Amino acid sequence: MSARGNALVLHSPLPGPALLRALNGVAQEIVFTDARVVDESFRPRAAASRTYRYLEAAPRGPLNAYRAAAAVVVGDIDVRSFGRGLPGGRPIVRTVHRFEVTEDGTGFVLEVSAPSFVWGMVRKLVGAIRQVAAKELDLATLRAAVAGRRRLTLPLAEPEPLLLWDVSYGVPWTVHATGLSRRQKAYFRTERHAAQVRHRLLGRLGEERFGSDEASMDAGGSE
């Protein structure tokens, strides 16, 4: 999993702009974008809302099927089927504010927002939605699990496409970074180039092994 939106609390005598510059010199792969002064009672875990995005590069069904399943898990849901290591006794309820599915090139972007999530919840929700889209799970059974009338054993979607997109505390950030440092820019250029090279190499290897028909690679098979 990666994160675009996250927050931490620290004590520093530096003013906001200087603090952001100092923090952005700590690690080239971590970018600090905003800051504000908070009182001693502030807790990073007490967010008003968290938003995750999941990049579904190879959808298991049509867009309308994904959206129909996503709509089922909006509202107050019993998460005992959608978390890891949860006790099976009393209902454990979380409130999902929204779950939207949009097209992004050849794939979908699944975006879900809630005040809090249990461990593994987003990946389990994606797994459930995939099963509905692939016609391996019907909407009625999913509704029963959401209502706590039925327990499901659901797969965990892969962690790599999961991104913590935003964390909101209901108050605005007051200081903003002016841009990436030279080290950070160099790091992201290098990472982007490496990803492009990997994509091209895998494409060529796939063509040599399976021919130019990408569908044959998606279909899988055995040696």
Image (cartoon, rainbow, N blue to C red):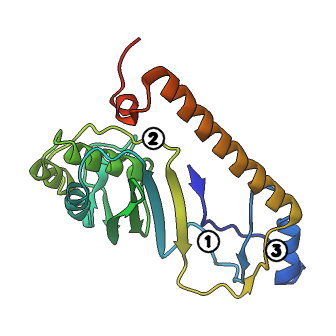
Of circles 2 and 1, which is in front? 2
Location of residue 40 (image quadrant):
bottom right
Q: CA distance from mark 3 to mark 2?
A: 33 Å
Q: CA distance from mark 2 to mark 1?
A: 29 Å
Residue 33, horizontal then vertical, whole percent = 72, 73
* Residue at the spot 35% in from the left edge and 20% down from the top edge: 221
Residue 133, horizontal then vertical, whole percent = 22, 48
Q: Which mark is residue 20?
A: 3
Furthest residue toward top? 223
The local secondary structure at tag 3 comes to helix
Q: Which residue is mark 1?
A: 43
The local secondary structure at tag 2 comes to loop
Q: CA distance from mark 1 to mark 3?
A: 20 Å
Label whose residue precedes the other's in the sequence (3 or 2): 3
Q: As displayed, is residue 208 above or below residue 181?
A: above
Left or right of 148 on screen, residue 170: right
Figure disc tally: 3
Three-letter amino acid code of the residue under disc 2: Glu
Q: Which residue is mark 2?
A: 158
Q: Residues within 10 Å of mark 3 (few under 14, many from 20)?
A: many
Location of residue 36 (image quadrant):
bottom right
Label whose residue precedes the other's in the sequence (1 or 3): 3
Of circles 1 and 3, which is in front? 3
